[in-house]
Image (tube, grey):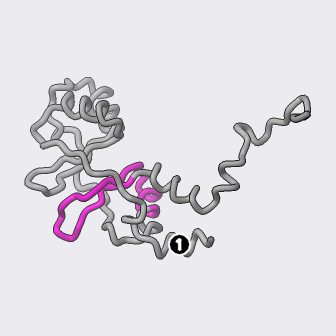
Amino acid sequence: MDLARNMMVDSVSRLHPTAPLHVAPHQSVRTAVELMRREHVGCLLVCENDQLLGIFTERDLLKRILAAGKSLDSPVSECLTPAPALVDPHEAVSAALRHMQEGGYRHLPVVENSGKPVGVLSVKRIVHYVVEHFPKAVYNLPPDPAAVPDNPEGA
């Protein structure tokens, strides 16, 4: 399979983005972090009336709350990343990967033309997509490819 060609042909929806979890801008950082922990996610979308205002990530928590000495009771609106890079569900995987690489993002909100968030695309989903194209090469790698066993394996 030709990965480069497939990345330009396959759409973001082919990666099955995670369903969006969101909080309102007035909710506390504490509430957002509790939701992130409970759902095992690295980001939440901050929405009001089904419209995306921003994204709240683990990095935002570290840099804008903990490192700044702010209270976890601060509203999410004070520490979110406003106007994040977006991706359309019909956009090519290569375009989404380019957005992530250029911006250093690990998550991209997937938003329809109406502006309504329909998912979140993570680097993890893209890695799984790449692995689909090279299963033998990836799954047959030893834990440390540079390590050589002292004794031959087998009988």
Q: Position of residue 38 (x, y in %)?
A: 29, 31
- Who is closer to the viewer here, 18 or 98? 18
Q: Position of residue 103 (x, y in %)?
A: 41, 55
Q: Which quadrant, please, contains the C terminus?
A: top right
User: Is disc 1 placed on a helix, strand or loop?
Assistant: helix
* Residue that appears at 16% across and 68% down: 114
* Residue that appears at 47% across and 49% down: 124
Q: Is residue 118 left or right of residue 145?
A: left
Q: Position of residue 63 (x, y in %)?
A: 33, 34
Highlighted magenta segment, given as a residue range: 97-121
- Mark 1: few, some, or many residues within 10 Å (few <14, many ≥20)? some
Relative to 60, residue 106 above or below: below
Q: Does the magenta segment cover residue 33?
A: no
Q: Which residue is mark 1?
A: 6
Tell me which corner region of the image, top left, top right, bottom left or bottom right, holds residue 27.
Answer: top left
- Who is closer to the viewer here, 70 or 27? 27
- The tally of labels here is 1
Q: Does the magenta segment cover residue 118?
A: yes
Q: Is residue 135 left or right of residue 36?
A: right
Relative to 87, residue 106 above or below: above
Give the amino acid at mark 1.
Answer: Asn
Tell me which corner region of the image, top left, top right, bottom left or bottom right, holds residue 142.
Answer: top right
Q: Is residue 151 left or right of residue 7?
A: right
Q: Position of residue 134 (x, y in %)?
A: 64, 59
- Who is closer to the viewer here, 141 or 59? 141
